[in-house]
Amino acid sequence: MKQSYLQCLKELKIFRKSCVSCADEKKKKLYFTWIREKTEKISKENDLNNIYENIVKYTLPNYVITQYTYNNAKESVKNIIKANYIFNNGKFTFNNPQISYDDVKMLMRFILFKRGNVIWLDLGFNIGNEFGGMHPVVILKNLDSDVFVLPISSKKPSEFVKIEKDLENGIISLDESNMRKKLNMEIIELTSVNGYKPMLRWARITRMKKCSLLRFNFMGTIGTLDGKYMDEISYKITQEFGSKINK
């Protein structure tokens, strides 16, 4: 252990000295920030109480449950909502910081981190062309301690940039441009994410991954994707990988 620790310090020192340009400085800052945050996450990965405390302190007070969500919840979840929330103007607002751990687990699984919800998540420091950093992700499947997620980006995919350039240059027609985008089995174009700033976003299904709940930003906004987008995601996953992540 000691030898590994000393070697790690040596490598970090070499890396720090090798960063000389402005771009290197930015990379260095991101890398060391990620090292610090990852160390903290790893040190708390088995501390379920830490997740509970963060959700009670940040997530539940900032997430309003709509009448629609309540009406579609199972009876046991409805009872938890009625016991820990205040109902006003068609919405349920959290009102019990002493809520039990078991009740929080139920809300996590069936309300907060359920399929179709969109929440900010830390994907970590990216290497090369990897997709990293803090991004909203759509939840595909909740596995209690882990979740399958699909990252969402506001950066237009290079494939779509090329298609639009061909359209602009008159190489293809508008109909052909739309058809090429539609036939792309890897990318989903999202015209809106409910609860988030209105703007175009994209999801690339080959980026879906399983993540720990510790990666979530518990202070972040929780939104939702419309059913038509979830259907498209499921369809493209089926076409690309031959299997479907079910509810």
Image (cartoon, rainbow, N blue to C red):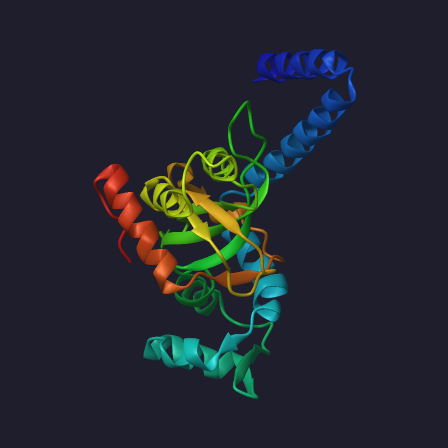
Q: Would residue 124 appear left or right of 247 to someone viewing this image?
A: right
Quadrant in the rendering for residue 87: bottom right
Question: Taking 245 as reference, is 23 left or right?
Answer: right
Residue at x 69% of width, y 25% of height: 27
Q: Could one spot residue 236 in this view of the protein?
A: yes
Q: Quadrant of the N terminus?
A: top right
Quarter of the view holding residue 58: bottom right
* Residue furthest front as drawn: 170
x 47%, y 39%: residue: 167
Q: Can residue 47 be seen in this view?
A: no
64 lies above or below 148: below
> Dividing the image into 4 quarters, which one contains the C terminus?
bottom left
Residue 198's x, y, as percent? Answer: 58, 60
Give whichever of 76, 227 is nearer the camera.
227
Place of residue 141 in the rendered image (x, y in percent of width and height, measured from the top left)? 35, 53
* Image vertical order of residue 70 relative to residue 223, above or below: below
User: Which is more toward the observer, 190 or 68?
Assistant: 190
Quarter residue 177 falls in: top left
Judge by depth and name the residue closer to the eye, 50 or 145: 145
The image shows residue 37, relative to residue 102, as above or below, that is above
